[in-house]
Amino acid sequence: MAREGREHGNREERDSEFVDKLVHINRVAKVVKGGRRFGFAALVVVGDQRGRVGFGHGKAREVPEAIRKATDAAKRALIRVPLKDGRTLHHETRGHHGAGKVLVRPAPAGTGIIAGGPMRAVFEALGVGDVVSKSLGTSNPYNMVRATFDALKRQQSPRMVAQRRGRSVAEIISRREGQKSAEASA
């Protein structure tokens, strides 16, 4: 019994490291014989602000229960995103889901998070401090969040690229720096 209590205490500490952002609540109605029964659907983004983020949605008759279910689903679906200097992304990426299309771009230090509603919540939970993004398609928060996650899953660090190509990280970075100087002189 004591062992279970300690594990539960550790779990509480582990859960407290996550930041959760409520993105959207939707009231849904089911028409029944006596009238309408209302329920709630919640979309939540959870992250540790150090490169791990997840989203989930939950449905229930009461708002707090829907939020709890969504938070639990988000914690089960965490992904790791490589960050450059712990503050921005490595490269520009596009993501899409359905009609939701997004463009995410790294930004210089001090820029801040330039993103609309649902995308801002994802970046804040992820721990990105400087990013520029644009939603090009729908404004539906569910599709925007899924499109943002699609873009984040496509992020690759120089280490990942070097490993895939069988080269060293220095070769990959020096080649990128060489291209930038050639473009500047042209």
Image: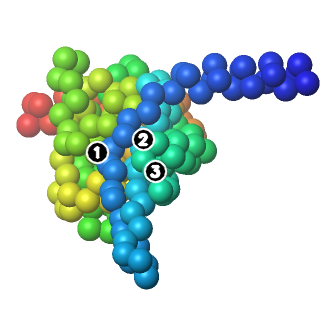
Cα–Cα span, label 1 and label 2: 9 Å
Residue that carries the numbered disc 2 in the rendered image = 45
**Does 27 sit left or right of 60 as displayed?**
left
**Residue 48: x %, y % from top left:** 49, 27
Which amino acid type is shown beneath numbered disc 1?
Pro
Residue occupying the point 46% across, 42% down: 64
Which label number is shown at residue 118? Answer: 1
Quarter of the figure that contains the N terminus? top right
Left or right side of 142 for 49: right
**Of callouts 2 and 3, which one flags the residue occurring earlier in the amino acid sequence?**
2
* N-terminal label among 1 and 2: 2
Hey, what amino acid is under mark 3?
A: Glu
**Labels 2, 3: front one:** 3
* Residues at marks 2 and 3, CA–CA distance in whole angstroms: 19 Å
Name the residue rendered at 29%, 23% in the picture: 129
Helix, strand or loop at disc 1?
helix
The tally of labels here is: 3
Residue at the spot of label 3: 62
Task: Give yes or no for contact between labels 1 and 2 (Cβ–Cβ under 8 Å).
Answer: yes
Determine whether the residue tagged by mark 3 lies in a helix, strand or loop: loop
Classed neighbour count for the residue bearing mark 2: other residues with Cα under 10 Å, few (<14), some (14–19), many (≥20): many
Report the front residue among 103 and 126: 126
Q: Residue at x 39, y 63 (%)?
A: 38
